[in-house]
Amino acid sequence: MPADAWRQWAAFAALFNPTTDPSPLGTFRSSPGAFAPFVDAEKFAAAARAFQSGQDAQTAAAAFSDFLRDQLGGVLDGLWGGPAFDGSAATGEEAPALGPNREQQERLQRATAAWRRLYQAQRRLQRLCSDALSEAARAFVSRQGVPAAPPTAEGLHGLYDAWIDCAEEAYARVAHGEAFGVALADALKAASEWRGECAASIEQWAKWLDWPMRSEINSLSLRVRALEEQQRERSRERETPARPVAKKAKKRTSAAKKPRGRTKR
Amino acid sequence: MSASLYAALSAARHCAPGCTAKDEVWRSGKLRLYRYRSISSPSSAVPLLIVYALVNRPYMMDLEPDRSLIRGLLSRGVDVYLIDWGYPDGADRFTTLEDYLERQLAGCIDEILKVRKLAALNLLGVCQGGVFSLCFAALHPERVRNLITMVTPVDFHTSTDLLSKWARKIDVDAWVGRGNVSGEVLNQLFLALMPFRLSQQKYVDLLRGDVDQARIENFMRVERWIYDSPDQAGAAFREFVVWFYQQNRLVRGGLSIGGRSVDLRTLELPILNLIGTRDHLVPPASSTALRDLTRSKDFTTLELDLGHIGMYVSARAQRQVPPAIADWLEAR
């Protein structure tokens, strides 16, 4: 086993890190995010080394706690669709829509409002996750203490696994909560509404340019489905013996006459 | 070690899943029905049809020679068919659960029964495919001889079901609109159930131990499968979320497909229910609920110390699951 486990981790992570990669892995530079976990592993190893470098326990724990919050926060950004965008209310969002372009203006206003709601929901999710990460970092530090021995490769793996356990436990507590579910649902709804308004705008352009519209294709699809159903119905009728159908029809006719007779009485 | 691991990952980047010879025996639209070629003498004349979920690709059932549920079953003489639902596109947005069950799944079963001159076959439903299998067996009991459900959600309102908690709050109509549901978005939701394990730890775990080419290749195949997420036909997705996740109709009742009531209490056939005790997607309690909902007098529950995906690709699953299924079928 190598003497300096951190160097081993760092060397491996450097292979994937676009900022340190000298040349042979150029193709991966264009998608550094795909290898973020390895870069994170490198950062974790560095933080772990600092954690175990002999400073006083409280300082080490606080530094490590800060590191964990930063580190895990990045993971969640990726899951919620990238870093948060500016969700401040756009100028003119409340302006009354007048004149021949009023429909387009209202659509744009609705899209902007949906965008802002998406941003707000994402911020709520991030705040909840940040709370979870604080809890995870506290739990991690209290469980680990500050070890005296320098880290081995296995020791680093052990620390890393413990960190993940703490993070998942804290995240699960938050994710099962009402606030998280509501924020997630709000984010999905706002994203869907924004997407719908964008689609409607493009649909308007398609109509103007006399291109095929989604609504036309939907109508055709539904018509094809109706025709397929008719065909299936006819196939079923062909497979059904004719005689029982005739009998049933006769019965229905006679049954239908009876109530009329009663009504007359 | 670092360079050799990198080289191993690079070498494995084109590893294709699927290892067992199979023949396409029927198709309908994007659906393909496959029959796997036997590799040992048959143990029964009644074939087994595997009904996989819509949300991932079914090749996970036959990932590689030493991680293949299908191969394990074939080696024990089980005659295996598999449904590949295909990748829905914009033309499938109005496809409903009735279409999937009463046309596509029913079409596969009719075809097998016609060719094999049988009255009924054995069904193995996996996850969402297990829900489909339960519904089909309730609608057409005469066509299913034995039913196996694997990591199948039944009670969608158990306290540990995180996906269900989220799904119950979602405005599905707004999400689906009149289109399909993106497989990528759905995948992000699945990853968000355990984000640190599923999007961080598994990569760092690659650094553990010596470089083993077989392990790396297995990792790359699973990686490919995880991100190979078909879009979901909008209408069917809406029905599935509302009827099962939000309204829990399998338990509470009121489920009907194509105008016909689906009541699990009508099920009297032999059932084997396979449950992963570490399943993070389908909590064990969600699956165990099945026992009390059917009238089957021949009901077997098999709980295995496995996760949702581990149930069909882990090394332990290869030793436990195919023999358990094959032995159970042979006894019936």
Image: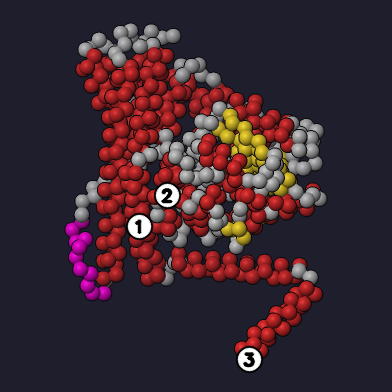
The amino acid at mark 1 is: Glu
Would you say B58 lies left or right of B38 here? left
What secondary structure do most residues of the magenta stretch adopt?
Answer: loop
**C-alpha gap between disc 2 and disc 1:** 19 Å
Residue bounds of the magenta highlight? A90-100
Residue A180 in the magenta stretch? The answer is no
Location of mark 1 (residue): A193
Q: Residues within 10 Å of mark 1 (few under 14, many from 20)?
A: many
Location of mark 2 (residue): B168
- x, y percentage for residue A113? 26, 57
Q: Chain of mark 2?
A: B
How many numbered circles are shown?
3
Residue B194 visible in image: yes
- x, y percentage for residue A183? 32, 46
**C-alpha gap between disc 2 and disc 3:** 56 Å
Q: Secondary structure at mark 2?
A: helix
Residue at (37% x, 59% y) in the render: A196
Residue B58 visible in image: no
The amino acid at mark 3 is: Arg
Who is closer to the viewer here, A159 or A143? A143
Residue at (36% x, 34% y) in the render: A173
The amino acid at mark 2 is: Arg
